[in-house]
Amino acid sequence: MSNQAVLTAALTGPIATKADNPHLPTSPQEIADAARGAYEAGAAVVHVHLRDGEGRPTADLQIARRTIALIEESCPALIQLSTGVGLQVPYEERLRLVDARPRMATLNVCTMSFGSGEFRNPPEGVRRLAHRMRELDVAPELELYDAGHVEVVRALIAEGLIETPITCSLVLGVQGGMAATAENLVDLVRRLPEGSIWQVIGIGRGNLPLTAMGLAMGGNARTGMEDTLMLRRGVPATSNAELVARLAELSRAIEREPATVDEAQELLGLAGAGV
Ligand code: KMH
Ligand code: ZN
């Protein structure tokens, strides 16, 4: 892994609402403004979930295209569109999101319990989505929540649906996936295919300790209001930028400079990819 650290800002997510934190960006313009703030604070990548006019998770392609356009006008951060979208959104709608042709999009490889809900990722649909992403030159960010998910990735590689080195997120702290512990992070990293490019995602209270560990291990890291609404115990975050600024400070403290967008393109294997 490189000495630079690729920091990703997960701006909105599918679950929180403004009632949970009034600073949560939900409209396309709010998301674009949040992307700019996160970029200025040190994020090279923004992970984007879309919301409809009522603030609900949506895979609406028009909203996707408008949000992407506004982000592109606001800052040069690399856009990673979530095809996870939300638990209630039909898989076929999620799959069609990549037609908006973001530079990157997530690819969740396994159905799982997700808190009190069910997160459907049927094997046949995952393969169609992986294939569609290759057709459209949308770089996949594999979302891995458990050790078994790595074995599904190996199968996708063997089937020629995913190129190596993979770029992936190790998501710890979702009820239904692995808990946010140091042991689980080390275990998942050890299981990855040789040369994998990984970032750590820690959910809730796990966000700060796990991203600190992941950075210290030489990985990349993500923060943002999708992952935690709190800056610290009892102190709600007032923006994504605030969470990213703290992560950038943490990264610099262990002598890992936050990657610029150009550096992130190289480090994530995107240089030359896409238009
Ligand atoms: N949508 C959540 C259920 C992703 O962005 O692809 C999981 C998620 C992963 O947010
Ligand atoms: Zn997400």
Image (cartoon, grey):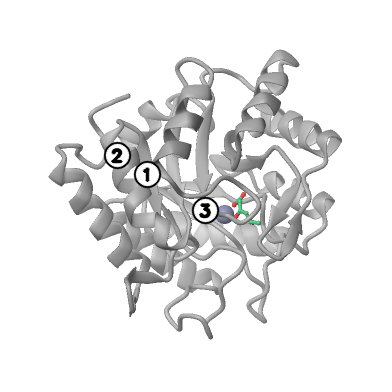
On screen, residue 159 versus residue 224, left or right, reads right
Q: Is disc 2's CB within 8 Å of ligand 2?
A: no
* Circles 3, 2 touching at the beta carbon (< 8 Å): no
Q: Point out residue 263 in the picture as x, y percentages from the top left corner.
A: 30, 32
Residue at point 45% right, 62% down? 204
Of residues 212 and 245, which is closer to you in this image? 212
Residue at point 48% right, 30% down? 187
* Residue behind mark 2: 215
Q: Earlier in the sequence, mark 2 or mark 1?
A: 2
Front tag of 3 and 1 = 3
* Residue behind mark 1: 221
Q: Point out residue 245 in the picture as x, y percentages from the top left corner.
A: 24, 59
* Circles 2, 1 touching at the beta carbon (< 8 Å): yes
Name the kind of residue labelled 3 in the image.
Answer: Gly
Q: Earlier in the sequence, mark 3 or mark 1?
A: 3
* Residue behind mark 3: 173
